[in-house]
Amino acid sequence: MQFMAVGICFWRYRLAKASFAAAGRAMNTPDRKPLIGNAAGIVCMLLWAANFPLAVSVLKHWDALAFAPVRLMLAGLTVLIFTALAGQLGAARQLLAESRFVIASLVFGVSALLFISAQARVDAVSAAVVVSSMPIWSALLGWLDGSEKPGLRLLVALVLTVAGGVLTSLVS
């Protein structure tokens, strides 16, 4: 099951990267703003972390197969509202016409369903520790497709990620 999930994540990564490039939003554009991007990433992780205990409490009363589509639908509506507020509905419509984006979205749905099924069977901390391995998989997939280069900074970041996951699992 884990191998299948890793395979799905690999194709999700590859297809999403191709979809963004096809939409004219290359991942490494010269006008990047790292400070804003990092701040958004920190806020994202705070919100994402709040998701684990909330989802575990909901999954005590809901079946994972019922929870997954409702959760994704509400998330999609939330993103759609922000997309409209940012005036990007036209760009969203263009993405819907891109077959790689549609396939990436379908793969994302399968990976979300697998994650929610796994989360229904473990506690919130265990689920968070597994998700904390995401940077390792992302770096590995980036090395495979040539978009990441191994270096000392990346190695230190990955070691800290693993150390944090190990420390968290020892505490709980």
Image: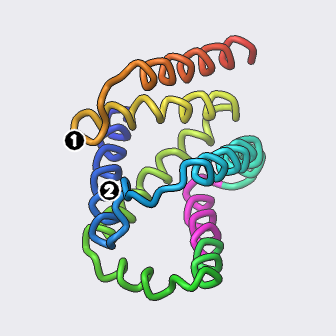
Q: Amino acid at mark 1?
A: Asp
Residue bounds of the magenta highlight: 63-77
Q: Relative to 171, say whether 49 is above or below.
A: below
Instruction: Give yes or no for residue 74 being in the magenta stretch.
Output: yes
The residue depicted at 48 percent of the width and 23 percent of the height is 158
Asked if the stretch drawn in magenta spans residue 69, the answer is yes
Give the camera-side residue of 52 and 63. Answer: 52
> How far across and how far down the image is residue 113, in percent?
49, 53
Q: Please tell me in which quadrant of the rendered image residue 74 appears.
A: bottom right
Q: Disc 1 designates what residue?
A: 145
Residue 126 to residue 53: above or below: above
Give the structural element (helix, strand or loop) at label 1. helix
Q: Which residue is mark 2?
A: 17
Q: Is residue 151 left or right of residue 159?
A: left
Cβ atoms under marks 2 and 1 closer than 8 Å: yes
Residue closest to the far front: 30
